[in-house]
Amino acid sequence: GAVVSQHPSWVICKSGTSVKIECRSLDFQATTMFWYRQFPKQSLMLMATSNEGSKATYEQGVEKDKFLINHASLTLSTLTVTSAHPEDSSFYTCSARGGGGRGSGEAFFGQGTRLTVV
Amino acid sequence: QKEVEQDPGPLSVPEGAIVSLNCTYSNSAFQYFMWYRQYSRKGPELLMYTYSSGNKEDGRFTAQVDKSSKYISLFIRDSQPSDSATYLCAMRGGGADGLTFGKGTHLIIQP
């Protein structure tokens, strides 16, 4: 399958600070990228969908001013958790889907980022 | 009722057994059905992708979709200890781009 790289794989930050997570499609151009969050013993929940060059579409209940998404190129999307609080501690994972050729069709996931806010 | 129901397990079977995993769903607009495997602290890995009803086989894995019953299954033949992981069903449709996931079933293959 196509390769999606996510960085960092884990991060610990202090309450009130901001954290940026990167998601890169390594061998295809990702026209659409998705960000998911997973709390313990819960399903992966879609947070937002972003298309290259346009604003992200956020799911109901997800604060767009808190979770800033930038999809500035066809191979990179970033999620910034601003003013993080302990309740934001979770597993965040991105997925990417291409518009044609390698990586098209279904979305491929990055390895995820474990965020802990202390 | 949640959109996608999946028994979280754990499901423990001996090595070599046939494993049956399944999900039920309520949204009749879902048309694309996927199974992902997720190891601890890792992102999901796509195993099977099926469009609409029917069967699909890939090596030791078989995916089945029954849209009339809103029921999907994943079968694993000749199970191996390395198959031990959490298996997530996911689906999309009705114009939505993102996936709706089940909670995942924790599978343990005993050597």
Image: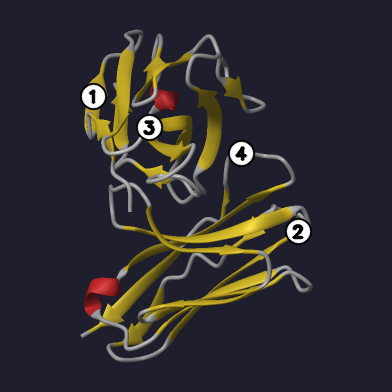
Q: Is residue B23 left or right of residue A115?
A: right
Disc 3: which chain? A
Q: Secondary structure at mark 2?
A: loop
Q: Disc 4 and disc 3: Cα gap in Å?
A: 17 Å
The lab-note entry on whether marks 2 and 1 share a chain reads no
Q: Secondary structure at mark 4?
A: loop
The lab-note entry on whether marks 4 and 1 share a chain reads no
Q: Quadrant of residue B58?
A: bottom left
Which residue is denoted by mark 1 in the rendering?
Answer: A12
Which residue is denoted by mark 4 in the rendering?
Answer: B97
Point 55% across, 36% down: residue: A46
Q: State the colouring used for the structure image.
A: secondary structure
**How many numbered marks are there?**
4
Which residue is denoted by mark 2 in the rendering?
Answer: B26
Q: Is residue B28 left or right of residue A42?
A: right
Q: Disc 2 and disc 1: Cα gap in Å?
A: 38 Å
**Nearest-to-viewer mark from 4 and 3:** 3
Q: Residues within 10 Å of mark 3 (few under 14, many from 20)?
A: many
Point 52% across, 24% down: residue: A50
Point 30% across, 91% down: residue: B16
- Marked residue nearer the N-terminal end (3 or 1): 1
Which residue is denoted by mark 3 in the rendering?
Answer: A29
Q: Is residue B107 left or right of residue A63?
A: left
**Nearest-to-viewer mark from 3 and 1:** 3
Residue type at mark 4: give it: Asp
Q: Residue furthest front?
A: A101
**Nearest-to-viewer mark from 2 and 1:** 2
The lab-note entry on whether marks 2 and 3 share a chain reads no
What percent of the width, then of the height, locates residue B8? 49, 64
Point 69% across, 49% down: residue: B93
Query: Which residue is nearer to you in this view: A100 or B86?
Result: A100
Q: Disc 2 and disc 3: Cα gap in Å?
A: 33 Å
